[in-house]
Image (tube, rainbow, N blue to C red):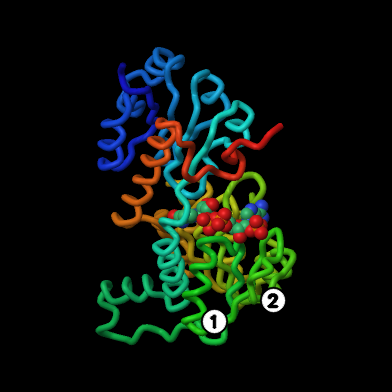
Amino acid sequence: MSAPDLLMPKPMLAQTVEALDRAFTVHKLWQAQDPDAVLAGIADRVRFIAAGGHAHVDEALIAALPKLEIIANFGVGYDSVDAAAAARHGVVVTNTPEVLNEDVADLAMALLLATIREVPQADRFLRQGRWLNENYPLTPATLRGRTLGIVGLGRIGKAIARRAEAFGLKIAYYGRRRQADVAYAYHPSVKALAEAVDTLMIIVPGGAETRHLIDAEVLEALGPEGVLINVARGSVVDENALVEALRNRTILAAGLDVFADEPNVPEALMALDNAVLLPHVGSATIHTRRAMGQLVVDNLVSWRDGKGPLTPVAETPWPREKA
Ligand code: NDP
């Protein structure tokens, strides 16, 4: 019997592809001259999807694959997969939680420090030869005395909070509910949190529910000493409102790892010297990406062997809930 058919819409790590090639008949859609024709030819056989590279798996694709059983997403954030539609079609979705927490939290702190202490700007200053004539100006911002408001105190949010405590920051948070086992101050809305702190760290899931959670009103509440760090998803922040707030110094500075229309970054953001911009590298170490890839493989193999998914997402719980 041939290995079960697996659809891979976008390229994944070589190590992950090799592991999947050993266990499945992998259809690498991105290599196809005519992806639609390839898809039509395998549509009634595909049981598995390995979704890397933020591959868009929407309801149309799910509905076009009547034998589809599982979508294994490469990444803890799965806003590019329509998990609600998958649930309606009886398809399980998995993601890659936990294995990336520490590297993403490190990057979040690096971005916070880089933004506050103007690390990329100082690097540019040196390379431009300007140090030969003058010292780099003293930075208006310092981490000293700041309170970090974490929007989304989940797995990664807590790893960031542990680091922030070591840096001497006070911590507060917003989520949909207060967490009983957490001693940090809870605020029942993002606006209330922004009013209470001077530094916001965004690490909630993306998608419709959190779209533009950070808008002009929240930025106004954060205030002129305010620093915004977004390592969540670009959709969570109203990018136009942020550009305005940075331009007008409604807030002091922002550090962004994620953008609304990646990899396109608005010229208006790039023109601002009070923004530090990174190309979505939160989890981008070889160590962590390999661990994420392995978890994708483990989920798919576990499912193939009849042992269920290892890390199903909330919309598709396992064992299945009784209707
Ligand atoms: P968790 O599910 O552990 O935590 C998510 C947190 O967000 C929870 O505290 C939850 O609290 C809160 N939350 C969820 N939905 C909402 C909502 N609608 N409104 C307000 N708060 C909400 O996720 P992780 O910590 O593992 O990951 C968080 C996100 O980080 C990912 O979904 C991904 O988008 C992003 N990420 C970005 C990376 C990068 O490269 N920049 C890398 C990895 C992750 P509550 O339920 O109480 O509301």
Residue 32: name its quadrant.
top left
Please say whether residue 233 is visible from this viewpoint. no
Q: Is residue 226 above or below residue 70?
A: below
Vertical comparison of 124 with 214: above or below: below
Image side of residue 14 versus residue 122, left or right: left
Q: Amino acid at mark 2?
A: Ala
Whether residue 309 appears in this view of the structure is: yes
Which residue carries the number 1 mark?
Answer: 169
Q: Position of residue 178 (x, y in %)?
A: 70, 66
Q: Nearer the viewer, residue 167 or 264?
A: 167
Counting from the top left corner in percent of width and height, residue 133 is at 28, 85
Q: Quadrant of the C terminus?
A: top right
Q: Residue at x 38, y 74 (%)?
A: 119
At 57% from the left and 49% from the top, the residue drawn is 206
Give the x, y percent position of residue 314.
Answer: 60, 45
Residue 77: where, in percent of width, then height? 51, 48
Numbered circle sitting on residue 196: 2
